[in-house]
Amino acid sequence: MVSSIKHIYRILLVALMVVASNGTTTANTRISLLTAGPGREMYQLEGHSALRIQTDNGEDIAVNWGVFDFHSPNFAYRFIKGETDYSIGATNFTWFLAEYAHAGRYVTEQELMLTEAEAAEVVRLVTLNMQPENREYRYNYLLDNCATRPLAIVEKALAVDGAKLQIAMEVEPASIREDMRRYHANYPSYQLFIDFALGSGIDQEASLRERAFAPLFLSEMVDHTKIVMSDGTTRRLAGATTTLLHSNMGETSEEGIPAWLIIAIVTLSAIAVTVLDVRRRRVTQWYDAVYYTLIGLLGLISAFLIFISEHEATSPNINILWADPVCLIIPLLIWFKKCKRLVFYLQIINFALILVWLIGQPLFHQSINLLFIPLVLSDMLRSASYIYLNRRCHDRIKA
C-alpha cells in the first residue's frame, strides 16, 4: 500500500514538473483555491484549503499542506510541544473530490486571476515544495498551516510581476480566540481546552491576514482581495465562487460527557464536602487528595505549555495561577499530621494565587472561559475551608 502511494505521488510530481517546465503552455494553466467545509473531527472545524492546478493537457491536481500521520511516534506529545511536522501532498483532483464527497463535506472553488507568468511561478514553487527534501515543514496552528501556505505561494508568485495583494474586506474586528469560539461553537469542551491552554497572545485584535489561519476565513478573504500591479492597476484575485460539492453531513457536535457536566459535578461535590467538613470541623482528606491531584495535573499541563512547549500562543497564560502544579504536593502530605502546617501554608499560597487570578482579570487582558469560574471558586472554597479548619496551625506559630 505504501509503495503504491509513493508511486502515485511520483506520477503527480512528474506531472507538475512537466507543467512547470513547459513554458509555452502556461497560458492554459489555471490555479484555483479549493476550500473544504468543516468536518466532524476537531482538527477539521476550520475547514481545509488546497490549490487546484489544471492544464489543457489534461493534468488536474489538488495540492494541500495538511498531510500528517496520527500514528507517527509520540504524535500527541509532539503536537502539544509544537514539534509536529506536516507535509505537502498531491492527489488527482477526482480523488480529492471523492474523498470529501464520502465525508459529506462541501467543497468550493475560486479560480485565481493570475497572469501567465504568475501561474507558471505557482507551479514552479509547488513543484519545488514537493521535492523530497522540501516536503515536510514545522506545522504551526496559527502561523504556518494548510491555509497560510497556499496564500504564501500565491504572494510569492505575484512578485514575479511586481504585484501584491490588497485586502478590501469589511468585517467586525475580532481576536483569534473569538474566531476560534465561532468555529468551535458546537464543540464547547474542545474550546474549553483551547481557552485553558492558550494565553493572552490570541486575545489582541487580529489583522485580516492573521485571521486567515482558518481556511474558511481565507476563502472569504480571497473573495474580497485585489491584485495591485506595479503600475497601480488592479484586478480581482479570484473569480466567482463555485460550489463543487454540497454538504450532506448535517450539523455536527461533540460526543461524550460534556465538560460543563464534569465541572458541575466537581463544583457541587466541593460545596457538599465543604459544608460537611465545617459542620464536623474536620477536613475530608481523601476528597482533597483526589481534588488536588486533578488540579495539580492541570497545573502540570499548564506549566508544560508555558515553559516547555514551542507554541508561542501558550505563553503567557494566567490560568497557571489557579491550575498550579504545586498543588500536587497536597495529596502527598495531607495524610501526615506532621505535615499539616506545611499544607496549611500551601493552601494560603493557593488561595492567594486564586485571588490574584480573580481580582486581576481586568489587568491581564486574557479572555477566560466562563466554565472556569465555578471550577476556580470550588478550588477557592476547598482552600479556604482547609485554612479555616486548621487555623490553629497559625496560632501555634504565633505562640
Image: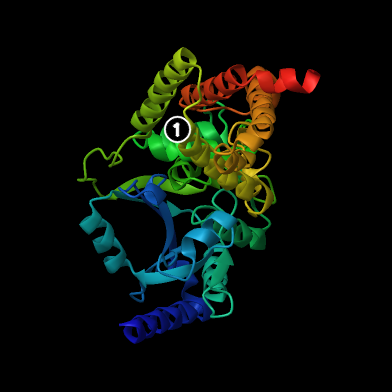
Q: Position of residue 125 (x, y in %)?
A: 57, 70
Residue 82 versus residue 234 in the image, above or below: below
Q: How many marks?
A: 1
**Quadrant in the picture for the C terminus:** top right
Q: Looking at the image, can residue 184 be seen?
A: no
- Taking depth in this image into account, of 346 and 150 the one nearest to the observer is 346
Residue lying at 56% horizontally and 47% vertically, measured from the top left? 301
**Quadrant in the picture for the N terminus:** bottom left
Residue lying at 58% horizontally and 24% vertically, measured from the top left? 383
- Taking depth in this image into account, of 246 and 48 the one nearest to the observer is 48
Residue 81 versus residue 263 in the image, above or below: below
List the single residue furthest toward the right.
Answer: 398
**370 displayed left or right of 42:** right
Query: Which element is circle 1 on?
Result: helix
- Taking depth in this image into account, of 176 and 74 the one nearest to the observer is 74
**132 displayed left or right of 260:** right
According to the picture, the residue beneath numbered tag 1 turns out to be 287
Q: Position of residue 312 (x, y in %)?
A: 66, 48
Q: Position of residue 48 (x, y in %)?
A: 41, 53
Amino acid type for the residue under numbered disc 1: Tyr
Residue 14 versus residue 157 in the image, above or below: below
Q: Quadrant of residue 103?
A: bottom left
Mark 1 burial class by Cα count in 10 Å: few <14, some 14-19, many 20+: some
Q: Position of residue 279 (x, y in %)?
A: 45, 13
- Taking depth in this image into account, of 204 and 214 the one nearest to the observer is 204
